[in-house]
Image: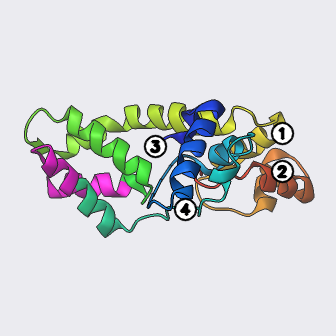
Amino acid sequence: MDEVQSASPEQLRQLSEVIQHVARKNLNIAFCFAGLPHEINALLEHPGTTFLRRAVPFSCEDLSDDEVATILQATAKLGDKAFTPDALARATQLCHGYAYLIQLIGSVAWLFSETSTIAIESVDASVPLVIERMGTQVHMPAVRSLPERELEFLVARAQQEEAITFGAIAEHMGKPVNPAFDTSAQAYQPGVD
């Protein structure tokens, strides 16, 4: 089940009951669900999802550039298209090993390609839509409930071009180091940055 955070607590409760019923009968069952970790955790706090809380979590790590390129090319081939070498290199670079970006960039570049070849122009043309979709589908849900100070921290962090220290972020915010560090610990949500 993808995007499990979109399910209602009642739907998850019902699903949990069915899974428990199957497990009690000693039948083999596997159930996988995916979504942003912080949203899954919030959903699993609802009553009736206790059984699902016992699931073994698995976090997807960033993929290597070779893995990204292989996935992009193989998936395009399933749709009777192929990336040119330079388009594949650019798409791979844009994905940063992040699974959802692979899906977004691959699908949008595939859509923008009017031939059986996905050229670098199609990849470059996909970037604005990919950024928009990442914002609405990943970033906005992740930050919508953040307090103002935590959001301010994330904005300051995002404005830095490279990885920097918490002290540098605090300086950018005009804050002492300790409060910025405390805020960062609260604001950081794995799977979003």
Q: Amino acid at mark 3?
A: Asp
Q: Which mark is residue 149?
A: 1
Drawn side of residue 133 relative to residue 47, left or right = left
Residue 122 percent across, percent down from the top left: 22, 39
Q: CA distance from mark 1 to mark 2?
A: 7 Å
Q: Which mark is residue 183?
A: 2
Residue contact between numbered discs 1 and 2, judged by CB atoms under 8 Å: yes
Nearest-to-viewer mark from 3 and 1: 3
Tell me which label, 3 or 1, sits earlier in the chain. 3
Report the side of 63 relative to 37 (left or right).
left
Q: Judge the density around disc 4: few (<14), some (14-19), many (≥20) Cα neighbours within 10 Å.
A: few
Relative to 48, does residue 181 appear above or below in the rendering? Answer: below
Task: Answer whether residue 189 is visible to the viewer in this image.
Answer: no
82 lies left or right of 87: left
What crowding class fits label 3: few (fewer than 14 Cα within 10 Å), some (14-19), or many (20 or more)?
few
Q: Is residue 188 visible?
A: yes
Amino acid type of the residue tagged 4 in the rendering: Ser
Frontmost residue, 43 versus 81: 43
Q: Amino acid at mark 1?
A: Arg
Numbered mark located on residue 179 in the image: none
Distance from label 3 to label 1 (Cα)?
Answer: 31 Å
Q: Secondary structure at mark 4?
A: loop
Q: Please identify, in this view, whether the residue under mark 4 or under mark 3 is nearer the observer.
A: 3
Q: Nearer the viewer's eye, disc 1 or disc 4?
A: 4
